[in-house]
Image (tube, helix red, strand yellow):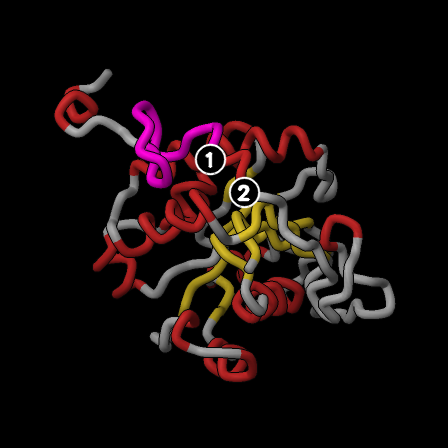
Amino acid sequence: MSFSDFLFPKRCVECGEHGSYLCESCIKKVGPPRLACPMCSRPSIDGMTHSKCLRPHSINGAYSLWGYNGVVRKAILGLKYKFASQIAEDLAEFVINNLEKSKLTFGKNARFTTIPLYWRRENWRGFNQSELIGRAISSKLGWDFKPDLLKREKFVKPQTELRGEERRQNIRGVFALNSKYQLTNQLINQSLILFDDVWTTGATIKEAAKVLKRAGAKQVWGLTLART
């Protein structure tokens, strides 16, 4: 036990049990989400994009680990709004266990990246929650982690304040490929896993995937902690 754990003992954010911010019992109560094609929202195996829905710049599939409720929802909100970066470590362990059991394949030698925050918001929060969890996941599973593939070029309203078409309009043109990857053509024919915390309408991940596809990526898969 570290000194900080002694002073501020870890408790499950749902039930208060000592030892972790997320306990095994509460995680088991959070059911899996309904997985659907990210383009038409009809059911699909592992959230794969239906062949008839797939377009040159569209995402190839979107897999989420849990529904957005219970201890998972509280942990994600804690990361975003309470600056509890230590929650990321405990959450990452459950993510890794879930992925290992699912036996998902995202393509040979897939690279792993995350949705970036605007620099002002990241400075205010002190970290990017998706990058913290993503780094732990990629390290454990041996994925090539490239957290700086994308950058946000402008500050927009938080997506949580918007609905439906407003989200799509709000996020349009926000992302761009990091110039160092443009110059070296490192994304040509690559398979990429694009990680974020929550899938609601999918507007953010689909917009980011479009940028990566235009840069030459062969496949882009969305991976989120939760789906609403």
Residue 159, image x, y percentages: 43, 72
Residue 26, image x, y percentages: 46, 35
- Is 101 left, or right, of 176 in this rendering? right
**Residue drawn at (29%, 31%) of the image:** 11
- On screen, residue 151 above or below 128: below
> Under tag 2, what secondary structure?
loop
Label ID, residue 213:
none
Please name the amino acid that badge 2 sits on. Val
Q: Looking at the picture, tell me which residue is in the foreground, 187 or 91.
A: 91
Please name the amino acid that badge 1 sits on. Cys
Label ID, residue 30:
2
Magenta region, residue range? 12-25
Tags 2 and 1 touching, CB below 8 Å: yes
Q: Main secondary structure of the magenta part?
A: loop
Is residue 82 covered in magenta? no
Q: Looking at the picture, tell me which residue is in the foreground, 149 or 138.
A: 138
Visible in this render: residue 211?
Answer: no
- Is 68 left, or right, of 120 in this rendering? right
Circle 1 sits on which residue? 26
